[in-house]
Image: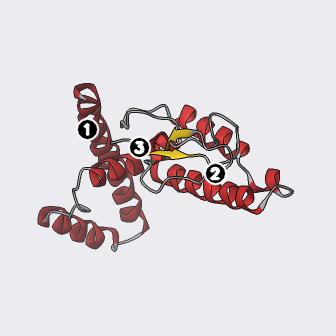
Amino acid sequence: MTPYVPCRACGAPFDALAAPTRCPACGVVVEPHPQATPFARLGVIPPRFGVDDAALEQAWLQRSRQVHPDRFARRPDAERRAAAQQTAALNDAWRALRTPFDRAVWLVGSVGVAEPRLPQAALVELMELRDEAAVDAAARAAVVDRCAVRFAEVMARAAGELQVVDAAA
């Protein structure tokens, strides 16, 4: 059920989970709702992995400018406090979604999956890589290069799987 919250200034109800930064009726800065998702805070509804990174950053910057506390220095205490809270909430949302990896972690956590554990085989592989890299600088460079390629492959595969999930939603 969507919580409609009355604006503290005009009393007009608004959808708090849609995460508006201002009251749609009177424009006063509203307090962020604790249950609003980082996606809603940045205007991405429904939540999904496949988001244009540049557009997401622009949404964050634009919304942050609208409620930056410096713009409300001469406003009543309640509005200054709401602007500071909105700024913090927007920054938290940006940190949660700014990279594909961050978005994937948030999406997985949002469906109740605890932080995944590294499989035993991966731990063994990491120990072998560490031993191999300990030989000399050239070996370290080769290990780093292989790890970068492997990481890119894993991220591409995960991104593809998450795109399928986005399409099914």
Report whether 167 appears left or right of 33.
Answer: left
Residue type highlighted by circle 2: Arg
Residue at far top of view: 167
Seen from the viewer's position, the closer of residues 70 and 56 is: 70
Residue 55 shown left or right of residue 2 in the figure: right
Residue to which mark 2 is pinned: 8
Task: State the mark number for residue 100.
Answer: 3
Residue 157 is labelled as 1
**Considering depth in this image, is 85 or 151 the residue closer to the camera?**
85
Q: Earlier in the sequence, mark 3 or mark 2?
A: 2
C-beta proximity under 8 Å, tags 1 and 2 = no
* Badge nearest the viewer, 1 or 2: 2
The residues bearing labels 3 and 2 have C-alpha atoms spaced at a distance of: 37 Å
Q: Amino acid type of disc 1?
A: Arg
Residue 88 point in image, percent of width and height: 60, 59
Indicate which disc, 1 or 2, sits on the residue closer to the N terminus. 2
Give the secondary structure at mark 1. Answer: helix
Above or below, comparing residue 33 to residue 47 in the picture: below
